[in-house]
Image: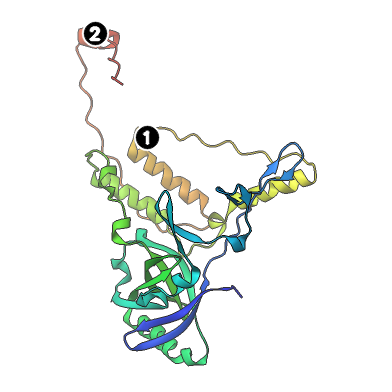
């Protein structure tokens, strides 16, 4: 059973649901420590007081806000727990919205909300079933780790899930990243849709959605433990420049079909239109074009 991260209540109008918050995800990454290469002694970070020039223990360390270079305002954990803020001890639901109206870029880490005792069972189930029937998600505010946050409440397998959300002013405007103006033909769009159909799947389960990085790292550790040769890394494929977009889409569809174990139900790729025959240049002009070098682009 995962440990409780935070305890409080969901405030839904005049309805209160006592809950415990636990992490909804697990990190299976292989982690490394730092070692002195000469003797493989562990290298550790030590907490040192700059004024006394000595290492201090954890019970001597607290939080503080630097008002000026010479004045620090100490803040205790009790003061953070008792902030004069409604969301300090409750997840306050402010609104209900369709999930599709929330930009996924604003949705972050997820947490399971567990009903805290028998008294929470009925209001918890009420909120779960109301969210299910409405096909909406709840937008709430809560205060953890020294700041007030925006959250999204949804239902997963009859359990409430709280997702941290970014505030609107935390999302950067992507307008400056737009490509230069370019035309894309209907034929090319149809080709891309045919490729998407070929690559469509019903679930995110399977070999292609496994963490191969962690598997490869485990192979290296095992090989070194047994003093065996390290597994060879495959040669990365060098992507060729796309000179003919339609040809690349056709080749991609064929490659995707070959990679799938079962035949895919796809649209027929649009046949490329025949290009008009290029007019031949007069012999004298063609010769001149061959001998004239292209001017280098300025840096």
* Image x and y of residue 30, in percent: 63, 53
* Image x and y of residue 98, in percent: 29, 72
Q: Is residue 285 left or right of residue 106?
A: left
The reply to whether residue 199 is in sight is no
* Image x and y of residue 112, in percent: 49, 74
Q: Is residue 165 left or right of residue 228?
A: left
Rendered position, 270 above or below 58: above
Q: Which residue is mark 1?
A: 242
Instruction: Residue 288: give its label.
Output: 2
Rendered position, 51 above or below 105: above
Residue drawn at the location 34% of the way across and 78% of the way down: 93
In the figure, residue 39 lies in which quadrant?
A: top right
| Label 2: element kind | helix
Residue drawn at the location 60% of the way across and 55% of the way down: 29
User: 203 or 55: nearer the eye?
Assistant: 55
Question: How would you rate the neighbour count of disc 2 (Cα within 10 Å): few for under 14, some for 14-19, many for 20 or more?
Answer: few
Q: Earlier in the sequence, mark 1 or mark 2?
A: 1
Residue drawn at the location 40% of the way across and 81% of the way down: 10
């Amino acid at each position: 059973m995962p440990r409780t991260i935070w305890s409080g209540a969901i405030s839904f109008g005049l309805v209160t649901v006592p809950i415990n918050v636990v992490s909804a995800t697990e990190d299976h990454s292989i982690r490394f420590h730092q070692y002195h290469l000469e003797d493989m002694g562990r290298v550790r970070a030590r907490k040192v007081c700059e004024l006394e020039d000595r290492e201090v223990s954890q019970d001597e360390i607290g939080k503080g806000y630097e008002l000026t270079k010479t004045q620090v305002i100490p803040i205790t954990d009790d003061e953070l727990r008792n902030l004069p803020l409604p969301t300090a001890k409750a997840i306050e639901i402010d609104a209900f919205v369709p999930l599709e109206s929330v930009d996924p870029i604003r949705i972050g880490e997820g947490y399971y909300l567990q009903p805290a005792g028998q008294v929470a069972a009925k209001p918890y189930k009420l909120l779960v079933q109301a969210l299910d029937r409405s096909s909406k998600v709840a937008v709430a505010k809560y205060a953890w780790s020294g700041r007030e946050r925006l959250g999204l409440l949804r239902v997963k397998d009859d359990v409430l899930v709280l997702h941290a959300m970014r505030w609107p002013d935390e999302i950067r405007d992507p307008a400056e990243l737009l490509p230069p103006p370019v035309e894309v033909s209907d034929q090319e769009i149809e080709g891309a849709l045919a490729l998407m159909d070929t690559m469509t799947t019903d679930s995110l389960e399977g070999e292609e959605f496994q963490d191969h990085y962690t598997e490869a790292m485990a192979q290296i550790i095992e090989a070194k433990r047994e003093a065996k040769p390290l597994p060879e890394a495959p040669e990365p494929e060098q992507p060729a420049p796309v000179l003919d977009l339609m040809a690349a889409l056709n080749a991609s569809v064929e490659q995707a079909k070959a990679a799938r174990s079962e035949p895919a139900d796809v649209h027929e790729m649009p046949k490329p239109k025949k290009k008009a025959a290029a007019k031949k240049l007069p012999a004298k002009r063609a010769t001149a074009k061959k001998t004239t070098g292209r001017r280098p682009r300025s840096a």
